[in-house]
Image: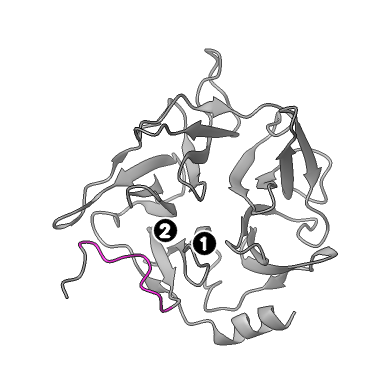
Amino acid sequence: MIGAALLLAAAAPPVIWSAPPISSDQFESHPAFDPWTGDLWFVRSTPQFRGWRIKLSHCGATGWTEPADAPIAGDGVEADPWFSRDGRTLWFISTRSTDGIHKKDLDIWRVMRGKDGRWGRPERLPEPVNSAGQEWFPRMDRDGWLYFGSDRPGGFGKTDIWRARQGRDGKWAVENAGPALNTVGDEYEPLPSPDGKWMLLSGADAYYRSERTAKGWTPRVKLGAEINANGTEIGAAFSPSGKSWLFGRDARDGRSGELMLVKGEEGWPKACPAAKE
């Protein structure tokens, strides 16, 4: 647990990263940078954190463009975008129609991109990954496990962290991520670090950290007040190195969520437009 203690002691207060037009009077969260284009995908919802939609903004000559609906947008609420490391796959959650039936619960979806850069047709992951309950925040670890949150039965609490792996036969196996990460309360956003050595996860009102060991995940440790300022923190994303991260927080005293940056002194995210030398 030495690594976690050092991080807690050395963490610098996050700063507001988002600015207009990314920033608005709505709630911005769940950022994801496209590895191919550098475009920013993120979630915009009402100040009450409802009506989620995935938005996209390009970095142009004068800065970020006015956010527009993502090209994979469907007919439901949608959130939690995340790109695979090679940029070929985008994971997200949605209530969009499936086989002509509009879903009431959030399911995990993914969409592949061809060599020409065009997105294919999104596919809903099958059971047992998706369930009759809610699924949130699908994030793939380096070891091939897909971590996500769900309120399905069989967990330790109200909502839990689960993980799924696809076998060579194409079938998925799902299991609870265990008591080190889960409690009798709510856990729903698991974010393995890029190097696979630790996990950032969110509970009902706070961020926690867990270390990976040869025996599995260590009991989670709550991050300090510089991160957990008011209980609205949500939707984190790591830089490729894992030294920096963005997350959403009500930083305006009125549930206008802003993207907050934990700086790792590596120049991430890149300036837009690029800084002149």
Q: Dot 2: within a 10 Å radius of its alpha carbon, few (fewer than 14), some, or many (20 or more) residues?
A: some
Residue stretch in magenta: 265-273
Kindly indicate the quadrant of the structure image that contains residue 200.
Answer: bottom right
Cβ atoms at labels 1 and 2 below 8 Å apart: yes
Magenta stretch contains residue 267: yes
Q: Earlier in the sequence, mark 1 or mark 2?
A: 1
Instruction: Let me know if residue 97 is in the magenta part.
Output: no
Q: Is residue 256 above or below residue 210?
A: above
Percent position (x, y) of residue 2? 72, 83
User: Which secondary structure dominates the residues rendered in magenta?
Assistant: loop
Q: Quadrant of the N terminus?
A: bottom right
Q: What is the three-letter code of the residue carrying label 2?
A: Arg
User: Looking at the image, which is closer to me, 144 or 8?
Assistant: 144
- In the image, is 38 to the left or to the right of 207? left
Q: Identify the residue shown where x is 78% and y is 36%.
A: 173
Position of the C terminus, as image quadrant, is bottom left
Report if residue 46 is visible in the image. no
Quickly name the residue at label 1.
232
Disc assigned to residue 3: none
Type of the residue with mark 1? Thr
Describe residue 136's horizontal placement relative to residue 249 as left or right: right
Residue at 71% across / 73% down in the picture? 221
Considering the numbered disc 1 on the image, is that residue within a helix, a strand or a loop? loop
- The image position of residue 248, as x and y in percent, is 45, 60
Residue position marked by numbered label 2 in the rendering: 255
| Residue occupying the point 41% across, 39% down | 53
Residue reaching furthest to the top: 100
How many angstroms separate mark 1 from mark 2 (CA)? 8 Å
Give the answer, above or below, for where 164 lies relative to 101. Answer: below
